[in-house]
Image (cartoon, rainbow, N blue to C red):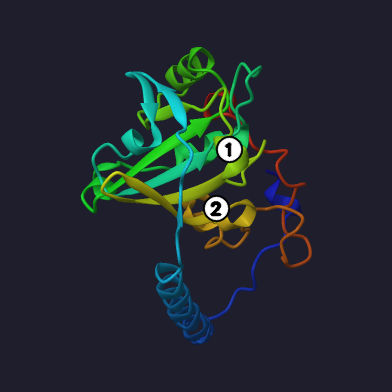
Amino acid sequence: MDTKNTALPQIVSETEWMDARDKLLVKEKELTRALDALAAERRRLPMVRIGKNYMFEGPGGPARLLELFDGRRQLVVYHFMMAPDASQGCTGCSSFVDNIGHLAHLNARDTTFILVSPAPLSQIQPFKDRMGWNVPWFSSNGNEFNNDMGAGDGFGLSVFLRDGDEVFRTYFTASRGVDRIRADFNLLDLTPFGRQETWEDSPEGWPQTQPYIWWRLHDDYR
């Protein structure tokens, strides 16, 4: 980046900076409480029974939706964009998975996290190996799971609850709804330059590019 031609934040005294920070903190606390209230409302959403007997293909062979819970009560599914004829996964979905931490913390709260794609397992596994991921990844090739869940040919996040042998769907989000659980986006949102994309409301002269064009598979940035 050419820093000589990049605009910078105003330079102020320590006291002035602290005053501006404290004013922003009031708004951040208000947002935190609003997000807590929204999460409480989300926990009170009704649920719908999943009646279809979806079959998936995983490293251990065929598996029903019920078996994807891996014995836990809650299941979070990321609908990963990888078409049946694709040789590699979507760069945006790949950067999302790069941001997933150790799953033991989710597992400790009776929750399983997996990826599901329409691509066959024979295409998924080589790409997963290339990326070095340990996240469980299943193929929905040949069934209507993605379409029925609202993801279609795109990406999204579905949440399921198991009660005995019955499976219920409790939540779904897509598009910007998935952003809030991406560590890279949330960290960039804390920086002066932000995500550096043209849709952002940034001061004049801030570095910006069109959205998406800077995204790469993590081994392509070099």
Give the distance between the C-alpha atoms of the residues marked 2 and 1, in whole angstroms.
Answer: 16 Å
Amino acid type at image mark 2:
Val
Can you tell which mark lies on residue 125?
none
Where is residue 159 drawn, in percent x and y? 44, 51
Residue 188 visible in the current orientation: no
Q: Is residue 143 left or right of residue 73?
A: right
Q: Is residue 192 left or right of residue 62?
A: right
State the image quarter where residue 57 is shown. top left
Query: Is residue 55 or residue 136 the one in the foreground?
Result: 55
Q: Residue at x 47, y 32 (%)?
A: 54
Where is residue 63 drawn, in percent x and y? 37, 26
The residue labelled by disc 1 is 146
Q: Residue at x 54, y 83 (%)?
A: 20
Amino acid type at image mark 1:
Asn
Where is residue 209 drawn, in percent x and y? 75, 47
Identify the secondary structure beneath mark 1: helix
Rendered position, 213 above or below 20: above
State the image quarter where residue 100 is shown. top left
